[in-house]
Image (cartoon, rainbow, N blue to C red):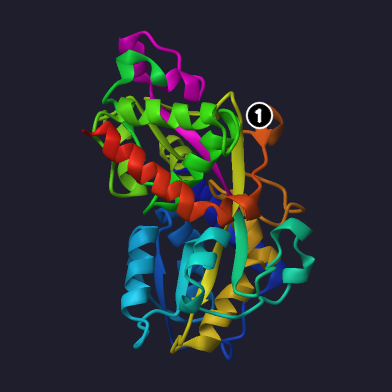
Amino acid sequence: MNKVLKFLLVSMLLVSMLVGCAPKSVGGGKLVVYSPNSDGEIEGILMYFGDKYDIEIELQSMGTGEVLSKLAAEKENPQADVMFGGMNLGVYNNNKDLFQEYVAKGDDKLPEGYRNKTGFFTNYLLSGSNLLVNTDLEAELGLDIKGYEDLLDPKLKGRIAAGDPTKSSSAWAQLSNILLVMGGYDSKKAWDYVEDLAEQLDGKMLGSSSQVYKGVSAGEYVVGLTYEDPSVSLIADGAKNLRVVYPEEGAVWLPAASAIVAGAENLDNAKLFMDFLITDECQTIIAGLTNRPVNTTIVQTNEFMKPFSEINLVFEDIEYVASKKTEYQAFWTEIWADSNK
């Protein structure tokens, strides 16, 4: 049993002792969930919720883009109740008709910047962009990767794992992070860097977030543009050939959210899940996972998580980036096509 899972089980026990078990009169029935989330979040949060409230969880795991496409295709006959993860302001703005309005109980207790201001999605954790490096391959190439600029080294051409920012929420977060720290969202300098990075990928763009970190771990790639949760999880699970790099140019942490699907059949359970996500109980569980709680009064307790004080933190203009998402994704699509001519 890995250290994170051991800690999680202890955390769950302590939380149960503090808050008590949920009454069985609450819950029951089922909850159908579509999610792009990692195994850690699925097991630590979703399955724990199902057990706590005696709710049968029907889960379909897929990338964010696939979730949205499936929800759109099922719009007239909704099959899911909840989109767990992958939701943010940009996703909401482009898919408003797919979701049900609901503000979770306790939302007003969250830090102002993380509250549900649209009325449609619940922020429940903070997710950061980082690089994941295969140290064996890095050493073979004689490299010391510290940030985005290092990815342009000719030795890395074709050996960088990256997802599609038009389909993957973590790849989109990486693109907006890059634009911010490499010159500014709309600057020529930043977009020139994006063009150079696209050339470095050498025609290889991966179809899902998981392919990025799994490819680096398996030695298929030297470095990947990914996110904190699965990166740290791999190391916590015992990987000796990996290290997490928070770009020296700056790393962004964004709130990750969940939302209720419009026309959800199991609406009461969907609302209960939204409420649960921001309880102290769930936030304490998150603090023991390889994630960071959106309730910043909850202390991070996972030993594998690097303190914010040791990371060059930068802050995204969330509303501006959301308003430019379609435009930036179109720019990327054009750049990618040009790099493959």
Indicate the position of residue 50 as horizontal and vertical percent values.
48, 75
> What residue is rendered at 60% in x and 55% in y?
125
Residue 2 sits in which quadrant?
Answer: top left
Indicate the position of residue 142 as horizontal and vertical percent values.
36, 8
Question: Of all residues shown, which one is farthest toward the left?
Answer: 341
Tell me if residue 111 is in the magenta stretch.
no
> What residue is rendered at 41% in x and 39% in y?
234
- Looking at the rendered structure, the secondary structure element under dot 1 is loop
Indicate the position of residue 311 as horizontal and vertical percent values.
65, 30
> What residue is rendered at 45% in x and 68% in y?
47
In the image, the segment drawn in magenta is: 126-151
> What residue is rendered at 61% in x and 68% in y?
122
Q: Label 1 is placed on what type of residue?
A: Asn
**Observer-nearest of 280 and 181:** 181
Label 1 Cα neighbours within 10 Å, binned few <14 / some 14-19 / many ≥20: few
Q: Is residue 46 visible?
A: yes
Query: Is 75 left or right of 228, judged from the image as shown?
Result: left
